[in-house]
Amino acid sequence: MNEKALIFDLDGTLIDSLTDIALCANEVLKRLNLPTHEIDDYKKFVGGGALVLIENCTPEDSSEELIEKALEEFKEVYDEKLQGNTKPYEGVYELLEELKNKNIKIGVLSNKPHKFTLKYVEEFFNSHNIIEAHGQKKEIPPKPHPLGAINIANSFNLPCENIYFIGDSDVDMQTAKNAGMIAVGVSWGFRGTEELIENGADFIVETPQDILKLLN
């Protein structure tokens, strides 16, 4: 079976959402009288989901109660201010259009809470044939656990080795490896190519169009 499919990470891969995430997190930190961070600092805080983000940006000695409060406030603030600065990376729409024309199955798997993942996919990609979109849910362990990725493969009715898992972080490359998929790291994301290579990237792509070259 030669049919291929793609599963994309969302933040740092399809969309540049760092500024909005950072602004919302900093607003919550200010409300709680905690130190804030530069926007660039958030590049190393994101990737593990909302809880990990909050754990990373609050002081090390923060209590569980404080982290829980900050997490709930972050979800509220982020829900209110979802798409002020967020936008797809250059070339992403063209890539998705070509994939659609080739009838290649596309999924999204994010550690962003499921509700927000669906909102973004609906907002930016509702005409681009993304047939499976999943964020973090209570019943599915977050990436790099492979279950979410394997579930998407099963829904595509394809073996994992036929699927390119595309992302910008160590978590994404580990997810691909854990699921037995082809690990593709994007150089334009939040983390940089060194981290991707160290975590097992089979390929590094410099532009969205390079993904099409891989498929060919």
Image: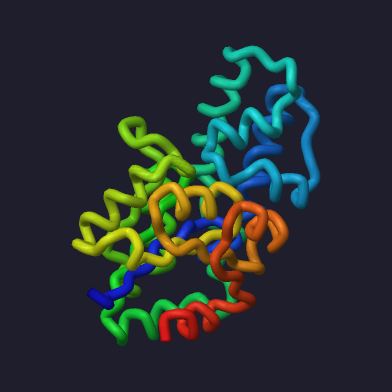
- x, y (%) of residue 37? 78, 40
Q: Is residue 209 left or right of residue 66?
A: left
Q: Nearer the viewer, residue 216 or 34?
A: 216
> Residue at 62% of width from left, 60% of height from top?
85
> Residue at 33% of width from left, 67% of height from top?
162
> Residue at 58% of width from left, 46% of height from top?
47
- x, y (%) of residue 65? 58, 13
Above or below: residue 180 compared with residue 31: below
- x, y (%) of residue 8? 44, 62
Q: Nearer the viewer, residue 81 or 124?
A: 124
> Residue at 27% of width from left, 77% of height from top?
2
Among the 4 quarters of the image, the one containing residue 62: top right
- x, y (%) of residue 9? 48, 57
Above or below: residue 32 compared with residue 9: above
Image quadrant in which the C terminus is located: bottom left
Query: Is residue 115 something one can see in this rendering?
Result: no
Image quadrant in which the N terminus is located: bottom left
Query: Is residue 68 something one can see in this rendering?
Result: yes
Query: Tag count in the figure?
Result: 0
Above or below: residue 185 compared with residue 100: above
What's the image's color scheme? rainbow
